[in-house]
């Protein structure tokens, strides 16, 4: 279970940052930054863990609790499908992280980042591999980013129901891949990713790229 050791040892304003959505075939990448201004209440800490280990209902409860808790600063950043195509998914994830940190009400003294690489935040950063299971700040950020992205994909699913984004959040499930082959690509698909790239190349080679673009 994550704890507050790293944050407490530093002693200053420490923000945890995590991103969600590097792997999907569709949708933006979303990052969140969370800074606990006065430590983590015990009841809240008990709700926080790596977002992948929590049920959707548990993530929603933790998300609500984080926003209701006093002294918790939360910010979200994202990078669009167009930005992913232009600068690649890793740099887009870094861009989303930077945007999240810049939107915090105060400048952190240290940023804890889940993973083994971090962008330039304009302040010190520390990478923590498996950080969403080690640091409460990173765990909180992972929950916020996951809930925000899932809600976004749910909204997109109402406009593009064929792909099942309400249940797969844009990841390449069997249903999603089958729908891509049947329906074609949408404006929210990542053109450089796997099956989407293959279909895009086929469209171009057919000489009529609009024939299989979903509308």
Image (cartoon, rainbow, N blue to C red):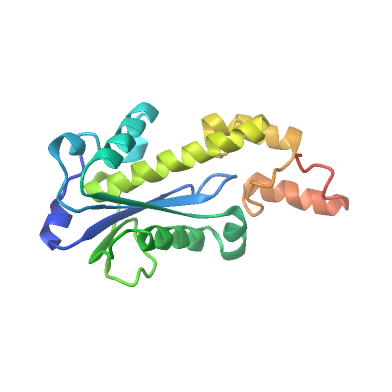
- Report the side of 31 relative to 112 (left or right): right
Quarter of the image containing the C terminus?
Answer: top right
- Report the side of 9 relative to 150 (left or right): left
Residue 27, given in percent of the width and then of the height, sits at: 57, 46
Residue projecting furthest to the bottom:
122
Q: Residue at x 55, y 31 (%)?
A: 166
Quarter of the image containing the N terminus?
Answer: top left
Residue 62, given in percent of the width and then of the height, sits at: 29, 35
Residue 13, given in percent of the width and then of the height, sits at: 20, 61
Residue 187, given in percent of the width and then of the height, sits at: 69, 47
**Whether residue 120 is visible:** yes
Task: Report which quarter residue 115 is drawn in.
Answer: bottom left
Residue projecting furthest to the right:
207
Residue placed most toward the observer, 61 or 69: 69
Q: Residue at x 61, y 64 (%)?
A: 86
So how many labels did they put on this image?
A: 0
Vertical arrangement, residue 178 with respect to residue 34, above or below: above
Q: Residue at x 75, y 35 (%)?
A: 183
Task: Report which quarter residue 129 is drawn in.
Answer: bottom left
Vertical arrangement, residue 210 with respect to residue 172, above or below: below
Task: Report which quarter residue 147 is drawn in.
Answer: top left
**Whether residue 49 is visible:** no
Q: Residue at x 67, y 30 (%)?
A: 162
Vertical arrangement, residue 83 with respect to residue 131, above or below: below
């Amino acid at each position: 279970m994550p704890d507050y050791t790293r944050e407490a040892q530093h002693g200053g304003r420490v923000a945890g940052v995590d991103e969600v959505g590097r792997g999907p075939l569709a949708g933006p990448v979303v990052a969140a930054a969370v800074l606990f201004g006065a430590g983590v209440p015990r009841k809240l800490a008990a709700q926080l863990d790596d977002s992948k280990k929590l049920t959707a209902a548990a993530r929603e409860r933790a998300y609500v609790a984080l926003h209701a808790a006093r002294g918790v600063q939360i910010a979200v950043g994202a990078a669009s499908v167009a930005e992913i195509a232009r600068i690649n998914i890793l740099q887009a994830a870094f861009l989303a992280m930077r945007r999240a940190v810049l939107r915090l009400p105060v400048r952190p003294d240290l940023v804890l980042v889940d993973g083994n690489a971090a962008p330039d935040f304009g302040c010190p950063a520390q990478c923590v591999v498996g950080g969403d299971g080690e640091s409460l700040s990173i765990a909180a950020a992972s929950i916020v980013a996951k809930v925000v992205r899932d809600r976004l994909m749910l909204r997109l699913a109402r406009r593009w129901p064929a792909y099942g984004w309400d249940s797969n959040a844009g990841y390449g499930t069997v249903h999603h891949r089958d729908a891509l082959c049947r329906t074609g690509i949408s404006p929210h698909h990542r053109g450089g990713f796997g099956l989407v790239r293959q279909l895009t190349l086929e469209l171009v080679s057919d000489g009529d790229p609009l024939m299989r673009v979903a509308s």
